[in-house]
């Protein structure tokens, strides 16, 4: 990897600014001063420092965000704040993107990464990665609803969903439920309840695959995943 590209990727400035650091002799590789921007470096095997500061290189970034309402799951938007806008500069320099999407008015667990391979694995319909949601429903959820979801329900466009596991957490005039599905159709949870004559009034994703939402994260906060959590996601978890 070119030294200027690596340093730019790690937030030491634009390519032009990095070249100035190199020309000033502030960059060392294994204690040797490097001034050529096109010099190659292996950051996993060589020690790189900038003005005496060791560069901790990493290719991928894996973040868990507790997405708030009013923010959209996109990398950029002309009108609305995006989840990427909530990131600190040292994280946004990796050019990460949300893995799938949560509706603008939906809260909860959202993975953000620049690892396209892992994102594809988590989103591929063939992998059947389960996603768990907590919701408030505007009516009494019944055993009939549980059975209907277990069979799959027909959405407004004629699509028949795959079976979902519906659990009643609290029954009443407005019920609280948990729902596990393995798909990610547009507004799917809301449309599934509409199919049985009910309406979602609050929706939160609380788990994706084996990874639960970190309950210590306030809305809008995020943290980096541990190596163990990333490995669990790679290994997958299917219904």
Image (tube, rainbow, N blue to C red):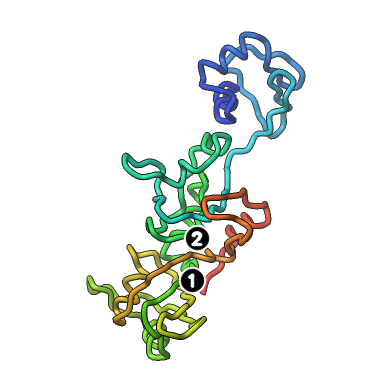
Where in the figure is residue 61, as x and y percent of width and height? 58, 44
Q: Are marks 2 and 1 in contact (CB under 8 Å)?
A: yes
Circle 1 sits on which residue? 134
Q: Position of residue 84 (x, y in %)?
A: 46, 43
Q: Residue at x 58, y 58 (%)?
A: 234
Residue that protrudes farthest toward the bottom in the picture: 143
Image height check: is 148 above or below 93? below
- Residue 128 falls left or right of residue 186: right
| Closer to us: 28 or 16 | 16
Task: Please tell me which residue is depicted at 48% across the width and 71% down the height of the picture.
Answer: 134
Q: Look at the image and tell me in which quarter the N terminus lies.
A: top right
Neighbourhood count class around disc 2 (C-alpha, 10 Å): few under 14, some 14–19, many 20 upward: many
Q: Is residue 207 left or right of residue 144?
A: right
Q: CA distance from mark 2 to mark 1?
A: 9 Å
Residue drawn where x is 58% and y is 35% of the image: 90
Q: Is residue 152 above or below residue 42?
A: below
């Amino acid at each position: 990897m070119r030294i200027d590209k690596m340093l730019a990727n790690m937030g030491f400035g634009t390519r032009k600014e990095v070249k100035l650091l190199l020309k000033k002799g502030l960059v060392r590789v294994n204690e040797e001063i490097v001034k050529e921007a096109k010099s190659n470096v292996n950051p996993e095997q060589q020690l790189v420092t900038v003005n005496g500061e060791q560069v901790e290189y990493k290719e991928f970034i894996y973040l868990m965000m507790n997405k708030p309402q009013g923010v959209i799951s996109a990398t950029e938007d002309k009108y609305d704040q995006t989840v990427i806008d909530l990131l600190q500069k040292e994280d946004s320099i990796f050019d990460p993107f949300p893995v799938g999407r949560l509706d603008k008015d939906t809260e909860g667990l959202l993975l953000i990464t620049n690892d396209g391979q892992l994102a594809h694995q988590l989103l591929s319909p063939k992998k059947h990665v389960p996603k768990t949601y907590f919701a408030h429903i505007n009516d009494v959820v019944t055993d009939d609803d549980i059975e209907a979801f277990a069979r799959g329900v027909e959405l407004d466009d004629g699509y028949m969903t795959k079976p979902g596991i519906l659990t009643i957490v609290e029954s009443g005039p407005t019920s609280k439920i948990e729902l596990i599905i393995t798909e990610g159709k547009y507004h799917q949870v809301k449309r599934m309840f509409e199919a049985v004559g009910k309406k979602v009034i609050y929706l939160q994703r609380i788990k994706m695959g084996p990874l639960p939402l970190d309950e210590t994260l306030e809305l809008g906060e995020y943290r980096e995943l541990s190596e163990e959590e990333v490995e669990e996601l790679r290994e997958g978890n299917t219904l």
